[in-house]
Amino acid sequence: QVQLVESGGGLVQAGGSLRLSCVVSGRTFSSYAMGWFRQAPGKAREVVATITRSGGVTYYADSVKGRFTISRDNAKNTVYLQMNSLKPEDTAIYYCAARSVGGLALSAIQYDYWGQGTQVTVSS
């Protein structure tokens, strides 16, 4: 059984920062490509950032490029999302996801396992 547990969400003012963490248990973490997605009320789930198994290649949505950084620590079974210069439009539930097939993937349907999500609220 693979489990993903996110943490680090909260309420922050515009311009502030948060760091999300996602701990993966149940199988070898380094065998998964990982992604962060978000879903705002009334909107579809969208990709935020993804990272390959080794961490050597990353992808960012245009809306977060230059502000967010995805990284992973395979020794700690953890993927991170550092979020800087936050904007009210970043408000959403953030989910981490694991993909057992290697390589970057931008669609939610391509991921096999999901966390329960962590709320991020950015006030103006």
Image (cartoon, helix red, strand yellow):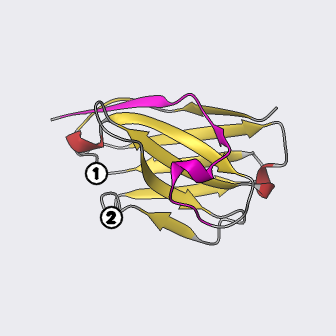
Image quarter where the C terminus lies is top left
Residue 74 location, quadrant: bottom right
Depicted 104 relative to depicted 92: above or below: below
**Residue visible at 43% across and 53% down in the picture:** 48
Q: Among all residues in the image, which is located at the extreme front?
A: 109
Quadrant of the image containing the N terminus: top right
Say whether residue 108 is magenta: yes
Residue 92, horizontal then vertical, whole percent = 35, 35
| Magenta stretch: includes residue 22 | no
The one of 50 and 84 positioned closer to us in this rendering: 50
Q: Horizontal and vertical percent for residue 63? A: 30, 58
Q: Amino acid at mark 2?
A: Asp
Q: Amino acid at mark 1?
A: Ser
Q: Is residue 7 left or right of residue 17?
A: right
Residue topped by disc 1: 85
The label on residue 62 is 2
In depth, the one of 20 and 93 nearer the eye is 93
Instruction: Out of 59 and 109, give the one closest to the viewer.
Output: 109
Residue sitting at x 61%, y 39%? 22
> Tag 1's secondary structure?
loop
Give the mark nearer the N terminus: 1 vs 2: 2
Cα separation between marks 1 and 2 = 14 Å
Q: In this picture, which residue range is highlighted in magenta?
A: 104-123
Answer left or right for 102 relative to 8.
right
**Crowding near the residue tagged with mark 2, few <14, some 14–19, many ≥20 C-alpha atoms within 10 Å:** few
In the rendered image, residue 20, in percent from the top left (x then y), is placed at 50, 40
Is 107 placed left or right of 56 in the picture? left
Q: What residue appears at the point 35 percent right and 65 percent down from the top-left corner?
A: 66
